[in-house]
Image: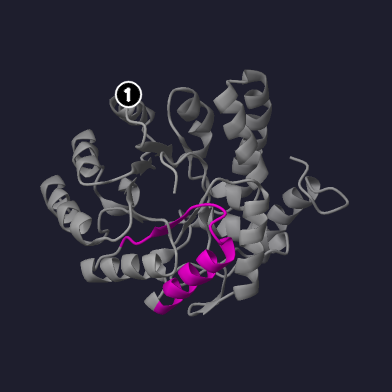
Amino acid sequence: MKLPLKGIIPPVVTPLLDDVTLDVEGLERLIDHIIEGGVHGLFILGSSGEGPSLPYSLQEDVIKRVCNQVKNRVPVLVGITDTSFTGLIKKAEYSKSVGADAVVVAPPYYYPVSEVEFLEYLENLSIRVPLPFLLYNIPSHTKLNISLHVVEKAKELGAIGIKDSSGDMSFFYTLVDRFRSDPEFSIITGTEMFIPEAVMFGGHGAIAGGANIFPQLYVDIYNAAVKKDVDTIIELREKVMGVHKNIYNVGQYNSRYVKSIKCSLSVMGICSDYMPLPHNKFRPFQKENIKEYIDSIMDLKGSSIL
């Protein structure tokens, strides 16, 4: 795996038939769809992949199938965040055994964790995890907003970068400024609307959920940002805004983000839209709203004209 990690790395959703059954054919179609869009890597079993909601056996099935299908065409990053440290280590070991390239780690998400405790956690993790690890800052889910100090210490322990989903652009720029001179440490945004600014001012890319649906769109806006092609960025940002307005804004609960991605993929005939408990898929009228938007941007051959 070449460092630093760069580009568009979709947080792949996990197609399901029910709480314990993988939509195997849907997963295969989804991986093909994403890779054909020109993405630079895959992040599986993260927040969008609903990793914490899935049994370990199903998680292992996803990891093995994705690695076997990708066949080293792009790096595969596996979300191993867990309330159980032992469970986390076992997932990391399994990921290595089937060919994953790196793992992604956020603070444990049930008991509140102090910064001091999390640093000790990372020290133990760095000794036992057999793959490179990427930090994941998502305070809305973990109760801990990772500080610059923690990131610096994590890098000393072997971290290869950070995905920042805090939504705090000033913190993101602080990270970019601090690690600008490091050729192997990646600063990656988890906020899709920040992609142009993140990349143009020194970030390395984005883990963008919308790239499950329209991978080429997000690859194009990343490439435009690398070139600092402002006119193209303005044009493509309008299309990204269309995704936000017409897909992500359907529904009223926090779960609507993943629901809307799965619903869109279902409408496109790629995979099931089943959501594991405690969540549920969109109601028929909500699905119809997304279908109307998807239909409006598809050509006669069934390809997006975004």
- Residue 155 vs residue 251, the one in the foreground: 155
| The stretch drawn in magenta includes residue 79 | yes
| The stretch drawn in magenta includes residue 193 | no
Q: Quadrant of the C terminus?
A: top right
* Image point (62%, 19%), residue name: 230
Which residues fall within the magenta stretch? 57-81
* Residue 249 in view here: no
Look at label 1 and name its amino acid: Asp
Above or below, comparing residue 223 to residue 20 in the picture: above
Left/right of residue 112 with respect to residue 254 in the rendered view: left
Q: In the rendered image, which residue does mark 1 sit on?
A: 177
Report helix, strand or loop for mark 1: helix
Left/right of residue 160 with respect to residue 258 in the rendered view: left
Q: Where residue 100 appears, x then y in whole percent?
A: 43, 61
- Residue 300 vs residue 161, the one in the foreground: 161
Left/right of residue 154 with respect to residue 53 in the rendered view: left
* Residue 157 in view here: yes
* Image point (69%, 63%), residue name: 270
